[in-house]
């Protein structure tokens, strides 16, 4: 009887062990899902961030930022975006696998030296989530599109004295976004907002760079 009972226990353990191992997988998977919650939310995203002018052109931006070469203008940005598609290559080793493409519209109110209203419309390419331990992750994004100032900006004409640049200019944005597993839907962002003539495409030489900090919320 004892041998029979031992055999029954051994068979039960050998049968239930794989089941328990399989049931343990969703727990680890759920952690990954919580960490990458912003990728599970395919709805509209709303971001609010404020910026400060950094003097000089785009190439000189890093040096001017380090030296604290700031201008007198600030701005408040309201950005609304929506995922349009995702690059799926079924290959984790491919750099572009998991990238998303988004459409984005911004409304910007300038303060200080500038007082005009600006609007942008652009496409955004965003990387997949890059893990920072078990409780945080970040991604990088680049926006390309157009920027329209509803009245002539005061700073931009100074780049080419006597010649007013076009109110419609090229817009590019560089962004880093940080999300925490403990705050589903919410993220913090750092963004460079650049507006220029794109090497003469939109008129005489002109550009402005603004560095911003803010938050974003993604709806499901």
Image (tube, rainbow, N blue to C red):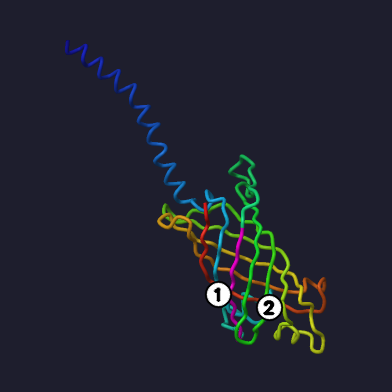
Q: Residues within 10 Å of mark 1 (few under 14, many from 20)?
A: many
**141 or 65: nearer the eye?**
141
Secondary element under disc 1, as helix, strand or loop, is strand
**What residue does disc 1 label?**
50
In the image, is residue 127 above or below residue 199?
above
Whichever of callouts 1 and 2 sits on the residue coming sooner in the sequence is: 1
Q: Which residues are magenta?
A: 72-81
Q: Where does residue 215 sit, x and y in percent of width and height?
A: 51, 66
In the image, is residue 87 above or below residue 182?
above
In the image, is residue 91 above or below residue 54?
above
Give the side of residue 14 with respect to residue 54, left or right: left
**What residue does disc 2 label?**
208
Count of residue discs: 2
In the image, is residue 37 above or below residue 142?
above
Does the magenta-highlighted stretch encompass residue 136?
A: no
**Residue at 82% of width from left, 76% of height from top?**
203
**59 or 176: nearer the eye?**
176
**45 or 1: nearer the eye?**
45
Mark 1 vs mark 2, foreground winner is: 1
Does the magenta-highlighted stretch encompass residue 77?
A: yes
Res 76 → quadrant: bottom right
- As measured in the structure, the alpha-carbon distance from the residue carrying label 1 to the one carrying label 2 is 15 Å
Res 66 → quadrant: bottom right
Q: What secondary structure do most residues of the magenta stretch adopt?
A: strand
Give the side of residue 214 with respect to residue 25, left or right: right
What number is the disc on residue 136?
A: none
Res 63 → quadrant: bottom right
Q: Where does residue 104 sit, x and y in percent of width and height?
A: 65, 61
Give the side of residue 162 with respect to residue 66, left or right: right
Q: Where does residue 178 sit, x and y in percent of width and height?
A: 50, 61
């Amino acid at each position: 009887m004892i041998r029979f009972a031992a055999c029954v226990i051994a068979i039960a353990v050998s049968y239930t062990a794989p089941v328990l191992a399989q049931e343990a997988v969703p727990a680890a998977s759920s952690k990954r899902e919580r960490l990458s919650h912003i990728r599970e939310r395919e709805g509209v995203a709303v971001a609010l961030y404020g910026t400060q002018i950094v003097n000089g052109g785009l190439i000189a931006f890093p040096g001017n930022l380090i030296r604290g070469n700031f201008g007198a203008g600030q701005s408040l940005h309201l950005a609304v975006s929506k995922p349009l598609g995702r690059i799926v290559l079924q290959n984790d080793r491919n750099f572009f696998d998991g990238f998303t493409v988004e459409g984005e519209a911004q409304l910007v109110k300038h303060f200080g030296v500038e007082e005009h209203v600006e609007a942008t419309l652009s496409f955004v390419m965003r990387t997949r989530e890059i893990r920072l331990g078990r409780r945080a992750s970040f991604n990088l994004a680049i926006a390309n599109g157009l920027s329209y100032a509803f009245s002539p900006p005061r700073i931009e004409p100074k780049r080419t004295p006597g010649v007013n640049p076009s109110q419609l200019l090229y817009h590019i944005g560089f962004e880093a976004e940080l999300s925490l597993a403990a705050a589903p839907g919410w993220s913090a962002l750092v963004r460079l907002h650049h507006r220029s003539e794109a090497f003469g495409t939109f008129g005489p030489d002109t550009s402005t760079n603004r560095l911003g900090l803010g938050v974003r919320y993604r709806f499901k």
